[in-house]
Image: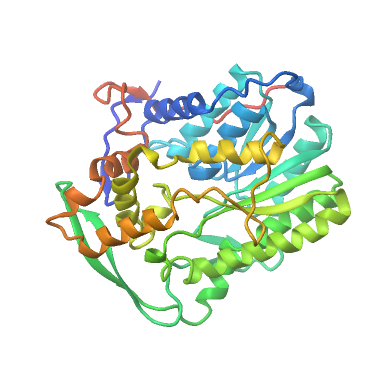
Amino acid sequence: MTERIVSSRSRGFLFLDSHPAGCTRLVQDMWQAVPDPARQGRPDADEAPVALVIGSSAGYGLAATIAGLARAGIRGAGVSFEKAPGRRTGTAGWYRTAATAELAAKHGRDFVFLNGDAFSDTLKDQVADLLDERFGGKLDYLVYSVAAPRRTDPDTGVTFASVLKPIGEAYRTKTLVFDGEGAPEVTTVETGPAEGDDIEQTVAVMGGTDWARWIDHLAGRDLLAQGFATVALSYIGSPLTASIYRQGTIGAAKAHLEQTARDLNDRLVKEVDGRALTSVNGAAVTQSSTAIPGIALYVALLRGVLGDAMVPPIAQLTQLWDQLTGTAPLDVDDEDRIRLDTWELTPAVQEAVAERWKTATTENIPALAALDWFAVQVQQLYGFAVPGIDYAAPVETDVPWPQRTT
């Protein structure tokens, strides 16, 4: 037994430990938030659609996994890269995966979780073997949701590193930080422009190269079912953050991802009568988004404008699965992207957020932004500030990775 009290120590938005019980409760709450499909004729467990979620332990990838299991009744596999418990606790994604696996088993879903480098061909081979041996050798859906700081090319061994930089000129923006006492501050930060091969490096990590490699790998093993569909999760965001996001190095990677979708779609239509798409999701507090200058302020102001009308990731991904499975019509824009962010980008909402952004200062930010909500969201990324959890009580931290059952 390795029970201990886990404290919520942090450095800015980065927490040093994660709370297993809090992570478990949050996964349970997400599952409960998925509406019962209330459909007759759900396939038997061994006839349920087979899905692969790459990046299944956090953010929108976690929501895709839970919504797929609870709403669409998928079986298959989830892939993530998490750190096991040791001197410190495991990562939050480690505990979220364990909780998701427990719920999947409880509800009769045959879903296997693999922990490793999704960019590597070794893991691709493991997944292909699993699909072949356990799931009848045919994959119906692949959801790609990977946010990573670096990627090693399996062919060359070269490691690329992604950067968060504007393109062309330096970028100054307001941003939201919290001091050591937790008091909010609105400050200005400046980020220098991309230099050298920053854009190419970021595209190599965050673009569509690895997504296409997954499709190549699985197609090479004849594992794509007729009518196979794949979707990569993406974000466009507000004009307020466009210079650092959509028009920056990450934006270049997103543009590459969307072009990859078009190329894959042309290929899949011919090969398996399939389809490839990107899904543009709305804003959320995630471990990735909090690292982007200005995003914390933007999301807190957005919540201040929308309140409970802000659509959480689990609700968005439930909509996505309904569209992928045909329960709801496929709703795409002129560039063939599924749009789950329309609630965020209406002119009225963006005008209200922009007005608050323009006037925001340290003194008036409590009246403009949902600071308490934002602070709770950040803590909950690591399993803290979850209602009903006794954080003064010891908790078991040595939680094992979900084992495959035969």
Residue visible at 18% across and 49% down in the picture: 367
- Residue occupying the point 46% across, 81% down: 195
Q: Residue at x 61, y 28 (%)?
A: 71
- Image coords of residue 141 (percent x, y): 72, 41
Residue 252 percent location from the top left of the image: 55, 70
Q: Is residue 22 left or right of residue 49?
A: left
The one of 149 and 346 positioned closer to us in this rendering: 346
Q: Image height check: is 212 above or below 229?
A: below
As displayed, is residue 359 above or below residue 122?
below
Outermost residue, front direction? 348
Q: Quadrant of residue 330?
A: top right
What is the total number of numbered labels drawn onto the structure image?
0
Left or right of residue 406, residue 271 in this image: right
| In the displayed structure image, the side of residue 132 where residue 20 appears, left or right | left
Nearest to the observer: residue 328 or residue 284: 328
Observer able to see residue 400:
no
Nearest the viewer among 367 and 241 is 367
Which residue is situated farthest in the left direction here?
A: 363
Q: Classify the position of the C terminus by image quarter.
A: top right
Looking at this view, is 235 or 379 the one in front?
Answer: 235
Question: What's the coloring here?
Answer: rainbow
Q: Is residue 276 visible?
A: yes
Q: Position of residue 13 (x, y in %)?
A: 31, 50
Q: Position of residue 210 (x, y in %)?
A: 66, 58
Q: Quadrant of the N terminus?
A: top left
